[in-house]
Image (cartoon, helix red, strand yellow):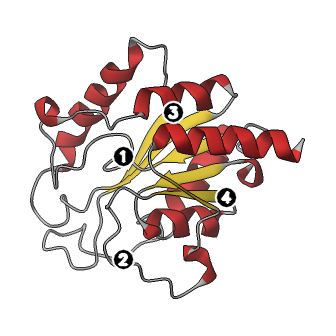
Amino acid sequence: MYKAVFLDKDGTIIKDVPYNVNPDLITLQPGAIEGLQIMQQAGYKLIVVSNQAGVARGHFMEADLPAVWQKLAELVSETGIIFTDFYYCPNHPEGTVAPYNMACNFRKPMPGMLLQAAQEYDIDLRQSWMVGDILNDVEAGKRAGCRSILIDNGGETEWLKHNAYREPDFIAADLKKAALQIVNSETVAA
């Protein structure tokens, strides 16, 4: 079995521009390249898991998302970073566009995207991590059986910690620091 780091996209890998699908506006967060390189060199599959409620809310079409994934892959490819896959959930229970206006097990904080990736790529979730900038990311990782890191960069605004799933294993300032925490945790466990 393989190990993976599941990564939120907006606010974690790239700067958060709400409901953006314009590739020209996609830029990397500080520390993103270094963090992704550290995790990849440590043998982790890098899998992006992203809520894309803009589809359900009518801000953009699902067909607009491949250009986003392509741009993200291009931004890191020159450094040798390869994303194993990109998963997204276009649904939101308060959406206005059918059939996307529903609750589902794939929308974080639910673990569906991580569970699907684990099945498709033979991933050991107990040896894997979820890294994101809000507690819904942390919760999705915990529900899937991963350890989780919260990137505390101002993305989380609600701080609703109503259950143990929302308690991150670690808090880091950026993706590089999160990657170092992952690698250091591996060393301590060995």
Mark 4 and mark 1: Cα distance apart in space: 18 Å
Please provide percent x and percent y for residue 188: 84, 45
Please provide percent x and percent y for residue 84: 53, 31
Residue 190 placement, left or right of 93: right
**Residue matched to label 2:** 103
Residue 44 placement, left or right of 95: right
Query: Visible in this render: residue 111?
Result: no
Question: Which mark is first along the chain, 3 or 1?
Answer: 1
Find out whether the residues at labels 1 and 3 contact each other: C-beta distance under 8 Å: no
Marker disc for residue 60: none
At 41% from the left edge and 34% from the top edge, which residue is drawn?
32
Mark 1 and mark 2: Cα distance apart in space: 21 Å
Q: Nearer the viewer's eye, disc 1 or disc 3?
A: 3
**Kind of residue at badge 3:** Gly
**Kind of residue at badge 1:** Lys
**Residue matched to label 1:** 9
**Kind of residue at badge 4:** Arg
**Residue matched to label 3:** 35
Looking at the rendered structure, the secondary structure element under dot 2 is loop
At 48% from the left edge and 70% from the top edge, which residue is drawn?
105
At 48% from the left edge and 27% from the top edge, which residue is drawn?
34
Mark 2 and mark 4: Cα distance apart in space: 25 Å
Q: Is residue 147 above or below residue 166?
A: above
